[in-house]
Amino acid sequence: VLISNPFIIWLICVFNSILDQLPYSMRILLESAVRNCDNFTIKEADVQNILNWKENQDVEGGIEIPFKPARVILQDLTGVPAVVDFAVMRDKVKELGGDPKKINPRCPADLVIDHSIQVDFVRSADALEKNQDLEFERNHERFTFLKVGTDSHTTMINGLGIVGWGVGGIEAEAVMLGQSITMLLPKVVGYKLYGELNEYATSTDLVLTITKHLRQLGVVGKFVEFYGPGVAALSLADRATIANMCPEYGATVGHFPVDSNSLDYLRQTNRSEEQIQVIESYLRATKQLRNYTQESTDPVFSQTVGLDLSTVVSSVSGPKRPNDRVSVVDMKRDFAECLSNKIGFKGFGLKPEKLNAVGKFMFDGKQYELRHGSVVIAAITSCTNTSNPSVMLGAGMLAKNAVAAGLSVAPYIKTSLSPGSGVVTYYLNESGVIPPLEKLGFDIVGTYLYS
């Protein structure tokens, strides 16, 4: 009952041994091609090209394959124009005497409004309400026109075992109208995680370490697939954090195949047991369910690299690029060197006489001084990091201890907190960390990704 498509039955029965060698991200592309094979937009030859990925990945010039996504997720900066295009097309069809209702997406499409929302009010209990009111006033027409919204950041979904990546608005519209997109059959870099994170290392420290490593390796145009026993110890929120920064390390996707933890996440987010059983049965039958601790199930990769999680330390990045990771213990020295380094990603080119420059200014009737490295903006924001309980509760506990130690934040620093969802706000409240955050100036200014 679960698998009635004859092509998929053929795929499982005839090419069982080949499936075992395919990276799990390629199995998803293969399953999609088989399921949508109509010998018009997706041909049997396309299925064979993906199935023979091991040989075809090295073909000079690459092999082009079609891909028909199951869903399109739009964010406001590119999504709103796409939706407006649909509205214009419907108007034109009506003008020509046709039925405008025929101009509709052929696949599920979700739109989220969060990327262009600004933080105008901070450090007050009503900052959230004021920011929302101003946003609805500033973009009244948009919110009158649009009635939908979900989540964002396409590559983040790879943390849940879904293959997805960002495309331009025209490509998104084409898929919404039922077209497949074309891509070159990618190489797949296997990234093995092993060992355990130390108690002070966070998922942010881990993703900054991975980002720097993969930038140095060079993965542009490639898929990165994570494997190894270390993955099994990562929560879904940690995996999403790593997948979300895929654009920063340059790959098309940073993929985590579905495992038992993924299915547990579906239970935690209130999916029905019946639905989960259907998903698990289908994934098992099509060999898409992963066991990270079972080395014998590791597929063939184009290239493999690894990271011992125990070597990850507390980190920051910069001063200009997220892939320029710096250990916290080296931050002071690194920043001092960057001030005088030649102008570039790791340099500002300041002359010796400018290194100790001081700027004075008045704020609320009091004079303050700014030096190189002074903090002027402190924002806890990100659709992904601010949905990770370990990171958010860590920030709350840090704030609680800072207040207990009598520390404070300078009043001229623009501080803000925008949790990834209402659920995050709930558990921060229940954990009792909102009051110390507010005392340090981190009042809630909005939800999702504010700028």
Image: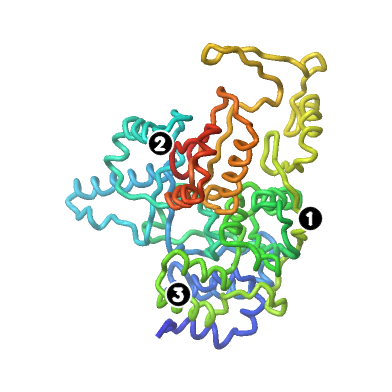
Q: Can residue 416 be spotted in the picture?
A: no
From this view, report whether residue 122 is shown above or below residue 6: above
Query: Foreground residue, 243 or 264?
Result: 264
Three-letter amino acid code at the position of disc 3: Ile
At label 3, counting other C-alpha atoms closer than 10 Å, the crowd grade (few under 14, some 14-19, many 20 or more) is some
Q: Where is residue 361 in the image (x, y as percent from the top left)?
A: 60, 12
Three-letter amino acid code at the position of disc 2: Leu
Point out which mark residue 311 bears: 1
Q: Where is residue 54 in the image (x, y as percent from the top left)?
A: 68, 72
Q: Residue at x 54, y 68 (%)?
A: 262
Point out which mark residue 276 bears: 3
From this view, report whether residue 249 is shown above or below residue 295: above
Reading the image, the residue beneath label 2 is 128
Of the two numbered discs 2 and 1 on the same chain, state the one appearing first in sequence. Answer: 2
Q: Is mark 2 on a helix, strand or loop?
A: helix
151 relative position to 19: left or right: left
Residue 348 appears in which quarter of the rendering?
top right
Q: Can residue 146 be spotted in the picture?
A: yes
Q: Where is residue 165 in the image (x, y as percent from the top left)?
A: 53, 55
108 relative position to 67: left or right: left
Of the two numbered discs 3 and 2 on the same chain, state the one appearing first in sequence. Answer: 2
| Farthest bottom residue in view | 13
Of the two numbered discs 1 and 3 on the same chain, state the one appearing first in sequence. Answer: 3
Query: Foreground residue, 124 or 297?
Result: 124
Task: Measure how far apart labels 1 and 3 are at the Cα level.
Answer: 36 Å
At label 2, counting other C-alpha atoms closer than 10 Å, the crowd grade (few under 14, some 14-19, many 20 or more) is many
Three-letter amino acid code at the position of disc 1: Thr
Query: Foreground residue, 271 or 116?
Result: 271
